[in-house]
């Protein structure tokens, strides 16, 4: 059984320590990950480091004497991520790597700041000459 110790990840902003909803996950003296969902992301990291998917894992806050979650196999934990939607709130969803085409909050944040935001990229010539829904509505 693996018990990870989690603690807030403190960053310095304007010369003052601040906590920005990121957590560190430690296995003994080894930092496993810094994440918003350290339990699930740590499971993926432990698998990458060669741990068996059948190994049970739990987490514990650094200042507590009891576990935060019931232990579960890291192979099962690694399959999930937590997303937040405007209408449905927090949800557990299947995790997909970036190579699988899943978006990430970092990618979405870069997209929001991009000058390309809102520009439709055509997939083919026919698609390029066909009006998109926004153009079609404004022309009507």
Image (spheres, rainbow, N blue to C red):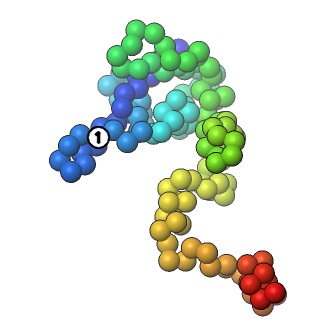
In this orientation, which residue lies closer to the viewer: 89 or 99? Answer: 89
Q: Describe the element under mark 1 as helix, strand or loop.
A: strand
Q: Position of 112 compared to 34: left or right?
A: right
Question: Is residue 62 shown left or right of residue 119?
Answer: left
Question: Where residue 88 sits in the image (x, y, percent)?
Answer: 69, 42
Q: Is residue 26 left or right of residue 111?
A: left
Residue 81: horizontal and vertical position, in percent? 62, 39
Q: Farthest residue to the top: give it.
A: 65
Residue drawn at x 29%, y 40% is 18
Q: Most extreme residue toward the left, as rendered? A: 15
Above-or-below relation of 107 to 114: above
Q: In which quarter of the image is residue 121?
A: bottom right
Q: In which quarter of the image is residue 63?
A: top left
Location of the C terminus (image quadrant): bottom right
Q: Residue at x 41, y 20 (%)?
A: 61
Q: Which residue is label 1 attached to?
A: 18
Residue 57, placed above or below residue 126: above
**Category of crowding for the residue at label 1, using alpha-carbon neighbours closer than 10 angstroms: few (below 14), some (14–19), many (at least 20):** few
């Amino acid at each position: 059984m693996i018990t990870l110790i989690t603690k807030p990840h403190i960053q310095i902003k304007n010369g003052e320590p601040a906590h920005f909803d990121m957590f560190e996950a430690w296995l003994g003296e080894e930092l496993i990950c810094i994440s918003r969902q350290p339990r699930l992301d740590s499971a993926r990291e432990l698998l990458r480091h060669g741990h068996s998917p059948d190994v049970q894992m739990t987490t514990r806050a650094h200042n507590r004497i009891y576990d935060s979650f019931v232990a579960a196999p890291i192979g099962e934990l690694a399959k999930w991520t937590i997303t937040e939607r405007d209408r449905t709130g927090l949800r557990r969803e299947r995790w997909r790597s970036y190579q699988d085409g899943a978006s990430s909050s970092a990618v979405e944040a870069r997209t929001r700041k991009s000058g390309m935001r809102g520009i439709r990229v055509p997939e083919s010539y026919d698609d390029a000459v066909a009006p998109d829904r926004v153009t079609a509505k404004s022309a009507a």
